[in-house]
């Protein structure tokens, strides 16, 4: 029986850090008798054995935040939590130790920033997994979650801008299939491959090991996502694959089956501790003489930890997607680029070729063996790989080796598939040297690819054809993109039609560009590109299509490009149309920003257009949303309504009797008393009742009377008394006598009280007559 243990079996860095943090906190608490309780919020990792051991040492599981004791310590699980849960934990006053995996934290940041920018979110993964639930919290649980190809095909995405991320432990193969499907369905989608690199390595290694084994044993929990994916991968390559969660499962398996003449492969999920893995390894291997060197190597693989690894409980984004690592790769690529260009004058020697059909002589066979030398390009077959190198059979006694990072940069290259199909690749011989350990052949695939893609970039530049690139780095004024290893600089002004403030979201994005500069004469190749030029070209083509088909009433999904005091300019596909401020809302608004914002996608319809002047008038508000619709049926005449005074003018007051519906109460219909201005009895915000006098759907007007229901007389201040002659009454309003009769009576009283001479009587009569004329004038 042969037993092979996968090199990447067991804890990943994020899980290991979480578990080590938990044990460290328990050790500290054991030394302090007054230490507060320690909780893990949910299960720290998906491994029952580890969880049970932590509970035995005193750690508690916190299912509800409100159950936490004040002053206690709460560990956030490696899968992460929602931002709402994190805020609630911090609000308890407890000490919160965040053990969220750094890869997961990076996904949280991507989703949070994309959602804040108005983009829609797609998450590829298991909707019930804690990691997915936590990520979905960053976009207020609005993400579309897809787990299968069928779900990807059934969902309708609309004409929105989408950002796609993946669960860190998701199947690499299924993710690729889903991405390919969505690329064909969604016009604007930004894809971020957020599957953990450890997950990818573990799945690739497990697939290869399973294909070489008679029996495959996967150690881990059936509730662990990455363990389930490993199980599926192994079952697709090995007909007899078993899941082992604890030693009793293995004992039951050994009791049923005889593996004495089998080749057995062992791998483990990211949540499986080293102790269980080694126990299974020893148990499977105890029936044969164990090669001590093999066991020692296996144990070292499980226990080796990078000495430079930080000891914090949380991985930062830089820890996972480190600047140092990317810089090192960039420098390596640059060095390789310069070396290629420095040898451009040399002819690339093609050694070997396709094998001819039929029999060949021994002499021909010897002649066809490639004569390896530095600078040659030969064909080889990939036979195996590890963390550092990919090993290639170049028909020499010694296998050549290529740095693993050269394949990691090519996302479309599947090493497992290449090994299985014995795929031939072109490789460049960098160096051949003899050491005490034997011959060492250093090869490069990137160098051959660089020459190939360099020619493709030059061809695209000459033919003005677009190419698809991936942004690999962000610099001061732009981004660095890669096309098959060829670096292309894109200035920030060439990324979008508008201004780009933040370049970081473009890291990892894939999109098409036009090559605008190709300078091969320099020592170092200089290539520049523009996405803006391509977008402008696409915009012109879309504009032609719009103008060729546009009709009044056509409906478009447009993007708000600019706001002015008089309206909003909306891009309906290569053409900007104007939505006047009066067409944005049925309500009275002061600025378009009250209704829409720049970058927002809205649905508009064509009201009018002028092809000669290239102008389009758009509408946004809908007839069915008109608050004045059917007002005759809603507010018939003589109906008593209640509303709020919203505006006042010298001629009357407007009262809002329903949302968006204003009725006019004329100043004469406010009070039974004469008013100079409505604000003598009314004020804005006052609630009043009124009777509907007149209503019309056609004119969109409603007239009401407040005084018929709730006259405002009592709020009117009494008029000041006028100063007049004492002989005359102050008012004739309440008198039953006419002004003339009142004057006559006053004259008689004067004659009875005073006896004057004739001259005096005549003067008095004249005076009274004059006063009578003044009174008449006043009354009139």
Image (spheres, rainbow, N blue to C red):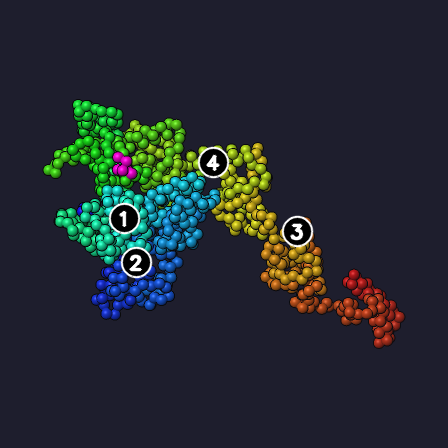
Q: Residue at x 39, y 40 (%)?
A: 180
Q: Residue at x 60, y 55 (%)?
A: 660
Q: Secondary structure at mark 2?
A: loop
Q: Position of residue 260 (x, y in %)?
A: 19, 48
* Pointer 3 with pointer 1, Cβ within 8 A: no
Quarter of the image with the C terminus in it:
bottom right
Dot 3 or dot 4, earlier in sequence: 4
Region in magenta = 417-422
Q: CA distance from mark 2 to mark 4?
A: 50 Å
Dot 2 or dot 4, earlier in sequence: 2
Q: Is residue 327 left or right of residue 296?
A: right
Dot 2 or dot 1, earlier in sequence: 2
Quadrant in the picture for residue 676? bottom right
Magenta span main SS: helix
Quadrant in the picture for residue 447? top left
Query: Where does label 1 land, which residue?
Result: 241
Using the rendered image of the protein, determine whether residue 35 is visible from the camera's viewpoint.
yes
Query: Where does label 2 land, which residue?
Result: 44
Query: Where does label 4 land, which residue?
Result: 539
């Amino acid at each position: 029986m042969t037993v092979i243990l996968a090199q990447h079996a067991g804890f990943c860095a994020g899980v290991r850090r979480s578990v080590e943090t938990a044990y460290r906190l328990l050790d500290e608490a054991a030394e302090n008798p007054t230490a507060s309780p320690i909780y893990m919020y949910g299960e720290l990792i998906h491994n029952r054995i580890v969880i049970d051991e932590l509970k035995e040492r005193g750690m508690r599981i916190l299912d509800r935040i409100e159950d936490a004791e004040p002053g206690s310590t709460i560990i956030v699980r490696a899968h992460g939590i929602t931002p709402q849960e994190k805020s609630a934990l911090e609000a308890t006053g407890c000490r919160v130790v965040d053990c969220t995996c750094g890869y997961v934290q990076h996904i949280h940041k991507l989703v949070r920033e994309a959602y804040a920018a108005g983009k829609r979110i797609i998450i590829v993964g298991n909707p019930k997994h804690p990691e997915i639930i936590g990520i979905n919290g960053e976009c207020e649980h609005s993400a579309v979650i897809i787990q299968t190809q069928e779900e990807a095909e059934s969902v309708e995405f609309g004409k929105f801008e989408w950002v796609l991320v993946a669960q860190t432990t998701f199947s690499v193969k299924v993710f690729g299939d889903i991405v390919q499907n969505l690329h064909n369905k969604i016009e604007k989608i930004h894809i971020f491959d957020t599957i953990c690199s450890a997950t990818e390595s573990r799945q690739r290694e497990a697939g290869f090991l399973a294909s070489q084994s008679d029996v495959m044993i996967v150690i881990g929990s059936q509730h662990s996502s990455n363990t389930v994916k490993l199980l599926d991968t192994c079952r697709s390559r090995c007909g007899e694959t078993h899941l082992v969660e604890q030693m009793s499962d293995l004992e039951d398996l050994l009791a049923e089956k005889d593996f004495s003449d089998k080749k057995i492969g062992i791998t483990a999920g990211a949540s499986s501790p080293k102790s269980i893995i080694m126990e299974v390894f020893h148990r499977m291997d105890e029936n044969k003489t164990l090669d001590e060197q093999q066991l020692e190597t296996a144990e070292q693989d499980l226990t080796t930890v990078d000495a430079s690894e930080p000891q914090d409980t949380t991985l930062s984004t830089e820890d996972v997607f480190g600047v140092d690592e990317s810089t090192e790769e960039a420098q390596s690529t640059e060095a390789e680029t310069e070396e290629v260009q420095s040898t451009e004058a040399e002819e690339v020697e093609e050694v070997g070729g396709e094998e001819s059909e039929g029999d060949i002589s021994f002499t021909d066979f010897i002649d066809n063996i490639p004569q390896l030398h530095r600078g040659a390009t030969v064909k080889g077959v990939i036979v195996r790989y590890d963390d550092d190198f990919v090993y290639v059979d170049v028909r020499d006694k010694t296998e050549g080796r290529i740095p693993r990072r050269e394949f990691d940069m090519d996302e479309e290259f599947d090493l497992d598939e290449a090994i299985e199909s014995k795929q031939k690749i072109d490789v460049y011989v960098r160096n051949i040297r003899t050491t005490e350990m034997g011959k060492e052949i250093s090869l490069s695939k990137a160098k051959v690819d660089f020459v190939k893609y360099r020619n493709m970039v030059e061809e695209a530049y000459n033919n003005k054809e677009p190419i698809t690139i991936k942004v690999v780095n962000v610099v001061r004024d732009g981004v660095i993109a890669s096309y098959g290893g060829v670096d292309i600089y894109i200035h920030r002004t060439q990324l979008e039609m508008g201004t780009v403030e933040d370049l970081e979201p473009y890291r990892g994005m894939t999109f098409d560009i036009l090559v605008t500069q190709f300078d091969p004469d320099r020592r170092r190749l200089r290539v520049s590109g523009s996405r803006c030029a391509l977008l402008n070209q696409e915009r012109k083509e879309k504009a032609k299509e719009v103008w060729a088909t546009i009709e009044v009433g056509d409906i478009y999904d447009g993007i708000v490009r600019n706001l002015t005091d008089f309206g909003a300019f909306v891009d309906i596909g290569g053409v900007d149309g104007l939505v006047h401020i009066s067409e944005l809302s049925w309500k009275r608004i002061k600025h378009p920003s009250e209704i829409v914002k720049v970058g927002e996608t809205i649905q508009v319809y064509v009201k009018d257009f002028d092809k000669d002047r290239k102008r389009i008038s758009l509408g946004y508000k809908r007839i069915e949303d008109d608050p004045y619709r059917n007002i005759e049926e809603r507010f018939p005449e003589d109906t008593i309504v209640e509303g709020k005074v919203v505006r006042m003018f010298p001629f009357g007051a407007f009262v809002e009797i329903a949302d968006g519906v204003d009725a006019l109460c004329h100043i004469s219909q406010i009070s039974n008393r004469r008013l100079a201005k409505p604000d003598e009895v009314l004020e804005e915000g006052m609630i009043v009742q009124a009777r509907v006098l007149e209503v019309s759907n056609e004119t969109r007007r409603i007239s009401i009377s407040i005084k018929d229901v709730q006259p405002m007389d009592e709020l009117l201040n009494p008029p000041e008394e006028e100063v007049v002659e004492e002989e005359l009454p102050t008012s004739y309003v309440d008198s039953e006598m006419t002004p003339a009769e009142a004057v006559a009576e006053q004259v008689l009283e004067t004659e009875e009280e005073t006896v004057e001479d004739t001259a005096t009587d005549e003067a008095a009569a004249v005076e009274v007559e004059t006063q009578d004329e003044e009174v008449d004038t006043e009354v009139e």
